[in-house]
Image: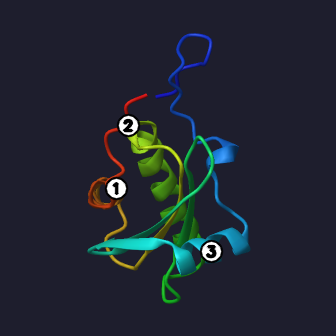
Amino acid sequence: MYVSPEKSQLSFRFKREERLKKRGEIREVFKKGRCVTCLGAKLFLLKNDLSHNRIGFTFSRKFGNAVKRNHAKRLGREAYRHIGYSLKPGYDMVLLVYPGKDTFASRQEQMNLLCSKAGLCGNKQ
């Protein structure tokens, strides 16, 4: 659900500044960040000096063709969009997804579990 900024300060959009896209930034999160895991996914996170979180999505080498990877990326973005506002700000995150159950419900469950394991839940703004 999208709430326009004029009506509320809380927006559920996945904004451009929340995307982690550059190869170097993603590699830095992999190298220097810490990792939490669950069945089918890993979340790498690294503290940044920003007032918001950034997230990138990547897949194991054996993760289907481009159509399946793009679908999985859309599911990940949507799952993040639903919980992103409630996370503690100031982290770069990379979600590494493995082949398996690829539904919105399973991706949302993975995101919730990984974020709670990482201690990101409970933003008090």
Q: Mark 3: give few (<14), some (14-19) or many (20+) Cα within 10 Å.
A: few
**Residue 120 position within the rendered picture, expressed as x and y whole percent measured from the top left:** 36, 50
Q: Is there CB contact under 8 Å for labels 3 and 2?
A: no
The residue depicted at 69 percent of the width and 63 percent of the height is 21
Residue nearest the viewer, comparing 108 with 28: 28
Judge left or right: residue 36 versus residue 10.
left
Q: Residue furthest top?
A: 7
**Would you place residue 63 above or below residue 24 in this image?**
below
| Distance Cα–Cα, label 3 vs label 2 | 25 Å
Which disc is residue 28 wearing?
3
Q: Is there CB contact under 8 Å for labels 2 and 1?
A: no
Q: Which residue is mark 2?
A: 123
Residue nearest the viewer, comparing 122 with 23: 122
The residue depicted at 39 percent of the width and 73 percent of the height is 35
Which type of secondary structure does the marked residue at label 2 adopt?
Answer: loop
| Distance Cα–Cα, label 2 vs label 1 | 12 Å
| Distance Cα–Cα, label 3 vs label 1 | 19 Å
Looking at the picture, which amino acid does disc 3 mark? Glu
Q: Which residue is mark 1?
A: 115
Looking at the picture, which amino acid does disc 1 mark? Cys
Judge left or right: residue 76 versus residue 50.
left
Q: State which mark lies toward you, 2 or 1.
A: 2
Q: Residue furthest front?
A: 49
Looking at the picture, which amino acid does disc 2 mark? Asn
**Would you place residue 93 above or below residue 86 in this image?**
below
